[in-house]
Amino acid sequence: MRVAMLMDPKFPVYSVDIEYNRKGPGLEPKEIEMPDENGELTTNRVFPDIMVHERGHNLRNFLVVEVKKSTNAVGDEHDLAKLQALCGQLRYQNGLFLRLSTGPNSALTGVQRQWVEGPAIGEF
């Protein structure tokens, strides 16, 4: 994802990864608990679109981003709930949901965004 490549130099003390699912090299995958379609709490592996974090632990997870195109008919609720869970359970300080405008008439003014706040570093 090109956005992650553009973000990388802006965060020199963190790793910027796309669809990264490990707590570190060779370690267990990242998992969060979320309700399924029946409301039952289940554990799911997660593959966030973009993560700005320090690999190997959950002590310095700075930003997690979910991105969706405006042409995607699926609602935003699942992505927002996932960001809430990532911030709460894996201690990301910030979550950002972006719905990008696509097509010939798309513009940056058409981007929808919503922030999710997690705990600050040291509030664990």
Image: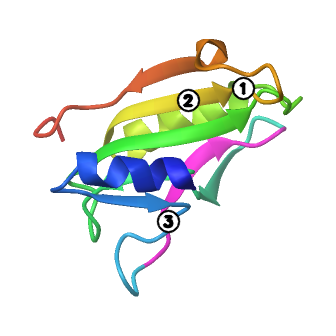
**From mark 2 to mark 3, how far is it between C-alphas?**
17 Å
Residue 90 visible in the current orientation:
no
- Is residue 11 rendered to the left or right of residue 79? left
| Colour convention | rainbow
Q: Earlier in the sequence, mark 2 or mark 1?
A: 1
Q: Which residue is under mark 3?
A: 20
Q: Which mark is residue 76?
A: 1
Q: Amino acid at mark 3?
A: Tyr
Position of residue 79 measured from the top left corner of the image (x, y, whole percent): 65, 35
Q: Earlier in the sequence, mark 2 or mark 3?
A: 3
Position of residue 88 measured from the top left corner of the image (x, y, whole percent): 39, 37
Query: Circle 1 — which element?
Result: loop
Task: Kindly give the residue lying farthest to the right in the view shown.
Answer: 73
Q: Amino acid at mark 1?
A: Asp
Asked where in the image residue 46 lies, by quadrant, the reply is bottom right
Q: Earlier in the sequence, mark 3 or mark 1?
A: 3
Position of residue 115 measured from the top left corner of the image (x, y, whole percent): 45, 21
Q: Which residue occupies 59% across, 20% down?
A: 108
Q: Which residue is under mark 2?
A: 97
Q: Amino acid at mark 2?
A: Phe
Q: Is residue 96 above or below residue 1?
A: above
Quadrant housing the N terminus = bottom right
**From mark 2 to mark 1, how far is it between C-alphas?**
9 Å
Residue 74 visible in the current orientation:
yes
Asked where in the image residue 56 lies, by quadrant, the reply is bottom left
Query: Circle 3 — which element?
Result: loop
Region rendered in magenta: 28-37
Q: Is residue 79 above or below residue 48?
A: above
